[in-house]
Amino acid sequence: MSIASKLRCRGLTFVLITALFFTLFQNALALTAFWQAIADTGRQHWIFMATVPVTLFCALNIIFSLLLLPWLRKPLAIILLLGGAYVNYVMYSFNVVIDRNMMQNALETDYQEIMALITTKMMLWLLLLGVLPSILVIVVKIQPAQHWLKAAGARLANIGFSLLIILVIAFFFYKDYAPLIRNHPHLVKMLVPTNYISGLTSALKREVESHKPLVDIGMDAHEGSVIKQEPKKTLVILVVGETARAANFSLGGYPRETNPKLKQNNVIYFPHVTSCGTETAVSVPCMFSDMTRKEYDAVKAAHQEGLMDIVARAKVSVLWRENDGGCKGACDRIPHQDITQLNPDGLCHNGSCYDDALLSKLDNYINSLKNDGLIVLHQMGSHGPAYFERYPAEYRQFTPTCDSNQIQDCDHQSLMNTYDNTLLYTDAMLDKTLSLLKSHQQKFATALVYLSDHGESLGEKGLYLHGTPYLLAPDEQTHIPFLMWMSDDYKKDYQVDSHCLEHKAQQQEFSQDNLFHTILGMLDIKTQEYKSELDILQGCRAQE
């Protein structure tokens, strides 16, 4: 009897064996890296460590149950095995992870570079992890299902059981997984085959998108009669916060005083404001686009002008200062500065800056302004999990603190203390920004707007950090602080009724959908893109 005739299995068994092989062999490097990262926390979480391969197997089982269908399972399995074997060799030999940039480099590799990579070691690696398993895939005979409906039911049951196991693990260990992935984002990029499939897809998508033309909007943008006729130029500073949640803002009723300085500045606080997303990569481009959350399309936003483009087109001077790793496309076509590159003395360390750095030499820029101006300051704010690194020592007011990025190991009160200290520092930074604006009131009618990009979970319901899918996200991640301040000259020139606005702030619900149109309204920029019903100040201006 031949070997081929002995190697028989059912379709579902083929899926399970494939998932097990990828878990134990093609992901051996990833499992080792996960376990090492857990061990580096200083505690041997043996049960948590044991869940990693179980979770990975269940996830791969679900993926392969959906992909390895009868008419394409063998060719697809072979492609994934060979691709995974090569990716493993690259990760092991060069100590790299696989992401979009790596796949982009692979797509651009020429013949000489490919030949230089071919070694005896590489061929052996491909043979053991790719070629030999592929031969087994070719040889094995998969028994046809007696009834397709029964086979489909078995697959669905298999998927359901795997999903149930993942949910159970998430229920008990989400608080461990969330900071682990946040602190070691490279771990996800080691998982085979999702790493190179995702990287390749993203690289190809970027290549296609790079050839798409930029869509211009607001081509009719111009300053209106009010801003042109006012005796002073207008200057608005928009501060985009990071990971500040409304639940911990004392201006919104939080019992601990986290906004002592803002409280003394007669700011108008909006207690009912929600974000567009639960992560910066969604919320920032969304809030600066003309699209609402419900209609937001990230691909469209990447190839379409936004708020800053329209403001600049209206001949308003614009500047974006960045302290949070990037503006996510919102400032690509306007003057912008990465504050970590400017590296103000005493405010930056290890490539990270305190938010006061955003104000460094900003006074000089304002002094040089000849036009009306809009300045955006993008904070590092309360970015986790290393909250203790977001504020200078003098703002360590609430103690004891969680001076670790392993936040799941801290008790809830110390974690809350540390987070509240970040808000104290944001309060102080905003106070300094207001002082800066007030120092230029002889030349400008000034105003300030502050809002966070999204909120944060601090252990409530077992959740930490942010990024939960919006439909499932708790209020802690979507309820954000939003406030405004206007000088007397600004209120006089634009005939803003502050009592009306304060009443509106308390009574109505708003979201990041309102930012685009509110800023256009505050600068009296006329364009067909402006929707007055989404302008927060609409109805509180005497000239309306």
Image (cartoon, rainbow, N blue to C red):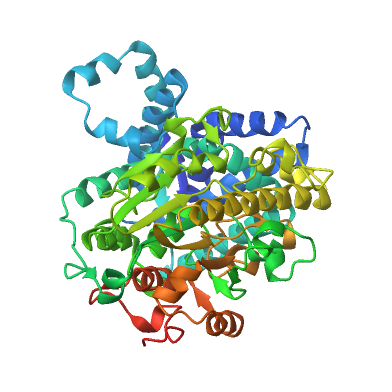
Q: Residue at x 17, y 54 (%)?
A: 212
Q: Nearer the viewer, residue 342 or 214?
A: 342
Quarter-of-image position of residue 458: bottom right
Task: Indicate the position of residue 494 as horizontal and vertical percent values.
Answer: 39, 76
Reply above or below: 291 against 336.
Answer: below
How many numbered callouts?
Answer: 0
Q: Establish if 107 lies above or below 249.
A: above
Task: Say which residue appears at 49% left-offset and 35% top-offset.
Answer: 190
Q: Position of residue 60 (x, y in %)?
A: 51, 48
Give the quarter of the figure containing the N terminus.
top left
Residue 78 in percent (x, y) is at: 35, 39
Give the position of the C terminus as an image quadrant.
Answer: bottom left
Q: Quadrant of residue 171?
A: bottom right
In the depicted view, which residue is nearer to us: 173 or 127?
A: 173
* Left or right of 184 in this view: 493: left
Q: Position of residue 89 (x, y in %)?
A: 41, 23
The answer to whether residue 173 of the structure is visible from this angle is: no
Nearest to the observer: residue 303 or residue 509: 509
Q: Residue furthest top?
A: 120
* Residue 160 in sight from this viewpoint: yes
Q: Residue at x 39, y 48 (%)?
A: 366
